[in-house]
Amino acid sequence: MKIKDITNYLEELAPLSYAEDFDNVGLLVGNYATEVTGVLVTLDTLEETVDEAIAKNCNLIVSFHPIIFGGLKKLNGNNYVERVVLKAIKNDIAIYATHTALDNTHLGVSAKMCEVLGIENPQVLIPKETFSDKNIGMGMIGELPSAITEDAFLKLVKNNFKTDCVRHSNKLDKKIKKVAVLGGSGSFAIKNAIQQKADAYVSADFKYHEFFKAENKILLTDVGHYESEQFTKNLLVEYLSKKFTKFAVILSEKSTNPIYYF
């Protein structure tokens, strides 16, 4: 089984054409013709991720976030990106990233967030204009099985996303039924969630002034960037394991969250 066989299957789920123009997805390190010994699935590719791949005899890392995002002008090992790439090359380990290609697919990041929260009948929040299939785009919006209080909703988010901290806008003393979600930095979609009359919006990386954009119309809920996307690697492992059984598809045991709470 070659790397190209794995990436072809991944691109059935998340075609690279779905990715945003600013992104850097696909095979970032390695050769498509290389025979696969094992696949390690992770959210981020760090030095310890490459070490884990080596220890588990995995020569392909499937990562959500791309380790190479901007251009690399040098490879001297002077920062973590250069060190990861050098270590991967030295150990013949390929790195493939899905990022916004998986964000924009109907069964991707936001769909997994909906599953975690129990949101029913989710639809795409911001359809991608370059595609006529309405199932392609950023974020999703759907409904909880029944309306719950704001406090109950915040507890649900905190528990199900396994986080020590949920930041939120002013509570409005109304029930939460319709919920929008978007993995990662999602402040750009606040207006879309409001336009579609969501009672709450779950995403990450809201800045101070962006909480004012709630305008007493919605409960903005910042669960954390890593936390919002943490189940993406489970999604990828489940997907790959259904197709490939001749080698191991392994869920990385390492948390790559760079943020800690005290």
Image (cartoon, grey):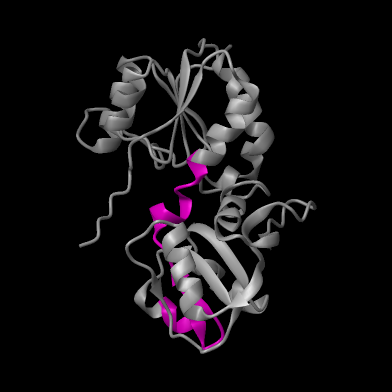
Q: Residue at x 75, y 51 (%)?
A: 131
Please provide percent x and percent y for residue 165.
33, 66
Q: Is residue 164 magenta?
A: no
Q: Is residue 121 or residue 160 the one in the foreground?
A: 160
Q: Residue at x 65, y 73 (%)?
A: 146
Residue 84 lies left or right of residue 59; in this view the side is left
Q: Quadrant of the C terminus?
A: bottom left
Tell me where residue 175 sits by quadrant.
bottom right
Can I make out residue 192 in this image? no
Please provide percent x and percent y for residue 109.
56, 49
Please provide percent x and percent y for residue 26.
53, 32
Residue 256 lies left or right of residue 16; in this view the side is left
Can I make out residue 25 in this image? yes
Q: Residue at x 53, y 80 (%)?
A: 149
Looking at the image, residue 99 lies above or below residue 30 = below
Please provide percent x and percent y for residue 30.
45, 19
Looking at the image, residue 58 lies above or below residue 184 = above
Q: Residue at x 51, y 39 (%)?
A: 234
Q: Is residue 220 or residue 234 the one in the foreground?
A: 234
Q: What range is drawn magenta here?
A: 210-233
In the displayed orientation, state which residue is furthest to the right: 132
Looking at the image, residue 196 lies above or below residue 78 = below
Query: Total marks drawn?
Result: 0
Q: Is residue 224 magenta?
A: yes
Residue 201 lies left or right of residue 163; in this view the side is right
Q: Quadrant of the N terminus?
A: top right
